[in-house]
Amino acid sequence: MTPALLEICLSMAVLCPSFEVAANALQNLGIEMNQNLLQNITHRFADLARIVRVDCHAEEIWQKPGMKILICVDGGRFRERRKKRGKRKTGQKRQGFYSEWVEPRLLSISQFDENGKKIKTFNSILDGSCGNMDDFFNLLKQHLSQINLNEASEIIFCADNGPGLWKRIEKLIEDLKIHTARRIIDYTHAKQNIDEVISTISQTLKLSKKKIEKISRKVNDLLWDGNIDGIAELVKNKLPKKRKAQKVALKKLDNYFGDHSQFQYKTFRDSGLPTGSGTIESAIRRVINLRVKGTGIFWKKKNAENIIFLRSLVLTGKLKNACRKTCGIVKKMFDNNILEDLPMAA
């Protein structure tokens, strides 16, 4: 297939809700291709393109000095299809399969302006992994290694406070020697977690709706100012005799809001820095939820990662570059007579 034809077929395969719909759409364009062939081509291409995975995102805009870079990570969900082991029961037509929820992780690397807003004229780097957390951070490290981080004016890591996440971010900062990088907990996630503290106070004291709103405004104002100690004092003042509820609320503050430097949202905003990871939240919806996650949809991990990888390329306008680079790999293999290294059809 030519790179141009390949680009059309792959775009349809990842943008349409299913391979069947994509094959029908291609037929309307005069390209005769059935569902199975399109699926086969898509996964074989993805296996090859992942050889030059990081190079597919290479652009000059990531080498300029003075960049303000925002790095966000988050996870989505899809159902994994795993075959059941053992002997099939008598009278059972199919062995069946397990369909447990799996968390694919997505990364977004973008540039922002002096107001902390994403620069939309530059394409972000989007990519994802269905492997473990270490595999994902290794992928993130590869992408960051191709960027001129040493001359960037700002480097921001923004994410929620998920378990094990920031420990790995700290190691990544150490490995890449970008010690000036700032760490920010996404403001929306922080508000969601502080709501649990507000709920503990209101349920314990059985407050009216009006009083709950008053406390909520006070707590959220303290959160915006990054005054976590002020919130702790408020909890102690409101629940002086309710030791159990007070302990629950303070434990939540200690667990999620331990490093106060990551919650200085007013200071971040005044300094022209972003306060949230809306870019990755949007990417999760566009890349994963609209194609991989859905009712009655089950995936093998490898196939799901292929679709996430290719859909990220399409949505960031990098597919054309990926097709050219991948076809170049195939041509080189033909020229060197090493076709046995090509990924074969499933």
Image (cartoon, rainbow, N blue to C red):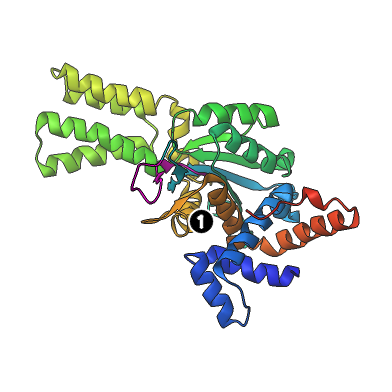
Q: Is residue 110 left or right of residue 158?
A: right
* Quadrant of the image occupied by residue 152: top right
Residue depicted at x 58% and y 76%: 26
Q: Is residue 34 above or below residue 91?
A: below
Q: Position of residue 52 (x, y in %)?
A: 74, 49
Q: Is residue 69 left or right of residue 166?
A: right
Q: Is residue 260 left or right of residue 149?
A: left
Closer-to-camera residue (216/335): 335
Q: Is residue 200 left or right of residue 172?
A: left
Residue 31 lies in the magenta-colored region? no
Residue depicted at x 50% and y 31%: 165
Is the N terminus in the top left, top right, bottom left or bottom right quadrant? bottom right
- Circle 1 sits in a helix, a strand or a loop, which is it? helix
Residue 119 shows up from this direction: no
Q: Is residue 115 above or below residue 40?
A: above
Q: Position of residue 143 (x, y in %)?
A: 68, 43
Residue 186 shows up from this direction: yes
Q: Which stretch appears magenta?
A: 88-105
Closer-to-camera residue (276/341): 341
Residue depicted at x 67% and y 32%: 178
In the picture of the structure, the residue carrying the numbered disc 1 is 287
